[in-house]
C-alpha cells in the first residue's frame, strides 16, 4: 500500500551558513525536496528566500521568510509566532534543523547536532549563553522525535534527560554532493607545498592553538606548512593572532572560508588532515577527508572515534607532545590507523540520511513510537 504524502515544514535557518550545519541544511533539503512522498514548506531567513527558489525542487510548495528583527527577534518569532503561520499551510510535521522548534500542537522533529549549547555555554556569546540553553532544552523535550546525528550525541542527550531515549533516532551524515561533484581547484600558493590541513573555525574547543604551539618544531623537522580552512569563530582572538604570527613567519596559512572546489583540492593534496577538537557532535570533516583519501590524525573525542570507525589515528587532545611526534611521523611514513573496533561496515550517505529523516516524519505522525 502506498503511504500518503506528508506535508513538512522545514526550518532552514542555516541555509546559507557554513560548516556542518549549513551543509546538513542544504543537502537534506535537496534530498527531501525530490521525494514524491513529501511536500515541503521551507522556512528561511529573508535573504535566503530566492536561493531556495532557485533550487527549483519539485516538491517545495512554498517558501516562508522568518519574521522578527535581529537574532533574538527572529528566535522569538520562530518560537512563538511560526506555529500560527504554518497552520495556514495544512502542515503534518514541523522539522527544526537548528536548536529551536515553534510552540505548537503539531507533530515535530528536531535535529540535535550536539549538547554544547547546554553543557558548554561559555563558548557562546552573551545572548546565546543567556537564552539558548533553556530554549534548546525545552525544544528537545517538546519534540515528538529527535534526530541525533551520532550515537555519541544521543548518549550525551540522555545524560541530560533520560526521558528523551524512546523518541531519539540516530541518523548520521554523509559527504555532500556539492563537494563530491565539484572539480578541484588548488589553493593559491600551495601547488608545490607540503602541508597539513585543519578544516574548521578557530573557536577554543577546536583546539587549533595546540597545533600552533607545536608547529615551529614540526615545520623545522618536516617542512610542512599548517593550512587552516574555516572562519574565525567565537572567542578566537588569541588563536587568530597566533595563527597570523605563524603566517608572517611563513609556516602557516589561514584561508578562511573557501569554495568547495578548493576544499576538495585541499583534502586531496594534504599530507595529513588534523582534527584536534576537544568536543564534537559528529565530525563531518572526517567523513569528507575519508572520501578523498586523506590520512587523518584526530582527537579521542567519542564522536570522532565513532565517525572514524578505526580509520584515523586518535590522540589525547591535550597531549601536545604526542601530536608533535605523530605529525612528524606522518610527514615521512604516513599515519598508522587505530585498529577498527566493531566496524559496522556500512558507509554513511546522504541518501540514508534522507531515508532516516522520512522515517522520523512518519514516526512523529504516529506519535513517536518506540524505536
Image (cartoon, rainbow, N blue to C red):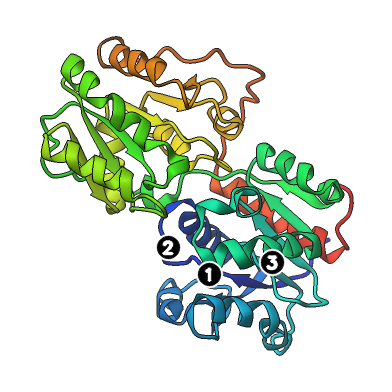
The image quadrant that residue 328 belongs to is: top left
Question: Which comes before the other along the chain, label 3 or label 2?
Answer: 2
Q: What mark, if any, has residue 13 been given in the picture?
A: 1
| Residue placed most toward the observer, 237 or 168 | 237
SS of the residue under disc 3: helix
Residue 5 in the image: state x and y as whole percent. Answer: 73, 71
Residue that label 2 marks: 17
Q: Is residue 131 visible?
A: yes
Q: Is residue 17 above or below residue 343?
A: below
Tags 1 and 2 in contact by the CB under 8 Å rule?
A: yes
Which quadrant: the N terminus? bottom right
Q: Is residue 277 above or below residue 108?
A: above
Residue that label 3 marks: 135
Residue 350 in the image: state x and y as whole percent. Answer: 55, 48
Tags 3 and 2 in contact by the CB under 8 Å rule?
A: no
Query: How busy is the neighbourhood of tag 3: few (under 14 within 10 Å), some, or many (20 plus)?
Result: some
Q: Nearer the viewer, mark 3 or mark 2?
A: 3
Q: In the shown orientation, is residue 248 left or right of residue 290?
A: left
Question: Measuring 13% from the left and 44% from the top, which residue is drawn there?
Answer: 188
Q: Is residue 336 above or below residue 302?
A: above
Question: Measuring 41% from the left and 47% from the top, which residue is drawn there?
Answer: 203
Amino acid at each position: 500500500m502506498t503511504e500518503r504524502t506528508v506535508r513538512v515544514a522545514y526550518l532552514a535557518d542555516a541555509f546559507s551558513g557554513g560548516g556542518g550545519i549549513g551543509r546538513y541544511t542544504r543537502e537534506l533539503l535537496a534530498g527531501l525536496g525530490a521525494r514524491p512522498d513529501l511536500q515541503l514548506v521551507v522556512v528561511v531567513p529573508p535573504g535566503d528566500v530566492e536561493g531556495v527558489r532557485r533550487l527549483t525542487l519539485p516538491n517545495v510548495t512554498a517558501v516562508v521568510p522568518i519574521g522578527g528583527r535581529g537574532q533574538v527577534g527572529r528566535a522569538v518569532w520562530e518560537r512563538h509566532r511560526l506555529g500560527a503561520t504554518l497552520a495556514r499551510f495544512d502542515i503534518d510535521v514541523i522539522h527544526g534543523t537548528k536548536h529551536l522548534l515553534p510552540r505548537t500542537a503539531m507533530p515535530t522533529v528536531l535535529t540535535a547536532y550536539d549538547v554544547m549549547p547546554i553543557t558548554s555555554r561559555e563558548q557562546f556569546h552573551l545572548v546565546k549563553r543567556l537564552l539558548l540553553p533553556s530554549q534548546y532544552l525545552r525544544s528537545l523535550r517538546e519534540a515528538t522525535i529527535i534526530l541525533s546525528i551520532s550515537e555519541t550525541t544521543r548518549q550525551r542527550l540522555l545524560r541530560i534527560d533520560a526521558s528523551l531515549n524512546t523518541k531519539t533516532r540516530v541518523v548520521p551524515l554523509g559527504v555532500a554532493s556539492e563537494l563530491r561533484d565539484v572539480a578541484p581547484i588548488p589553493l593559491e600558493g600551495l601547488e608545490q607545498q607540503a602541508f597539513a590541513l585543519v578544516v574548521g573555525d578557530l573557536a577554543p574547543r577546536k583546539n587549533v592553538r595546540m597545533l600552533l604551539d607545536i608547529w615551529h618544531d614540526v615545520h623545522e623537522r618536516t617542512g610542512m606548512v599548517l593550512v587552516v580552512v574555516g572562519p574565525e569563530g567565537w572567542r578566537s582572538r588569541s588563536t587568530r593572532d597566533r595563527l597570523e604570527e605563524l603566517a608572517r613567519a611563513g609556516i602557516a596559512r589561514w584561508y578562511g572560508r573557501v569554495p568547495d572546489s578548493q576544499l576538495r583540492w585541499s583534502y586531496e593534496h594534504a599530507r595529513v588532515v588534523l582534527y584536534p577538537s576537544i568536543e564534537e557532535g559528529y565530525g563531518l570533516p572526517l567523513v569528507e577527508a575519508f572520501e578523498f583519501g586523506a590520512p587523518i590524525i584526530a582527537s579521542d573525542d567519542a564522536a570522532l572515534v565513532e565517525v572514524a570507525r578505526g580509520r584515523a589515528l586518535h590522540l589525547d587532545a591535550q597531549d601536545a607532545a604526542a601530536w608533535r611526534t605523530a605529525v612528524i611521523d606522518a610527514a615521512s611514513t604516513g599515519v598508522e590507523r587505530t585498529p577498527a573496533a566493531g566496524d559496522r561496515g556500512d558507509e554513511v550517505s546522504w541518501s540514508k540520511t534522507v531515508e532516516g529523516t522520512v522515517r522520523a516524519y512518519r514516526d512523529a505522525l504516529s506519535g513517536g513510537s518506540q524505536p
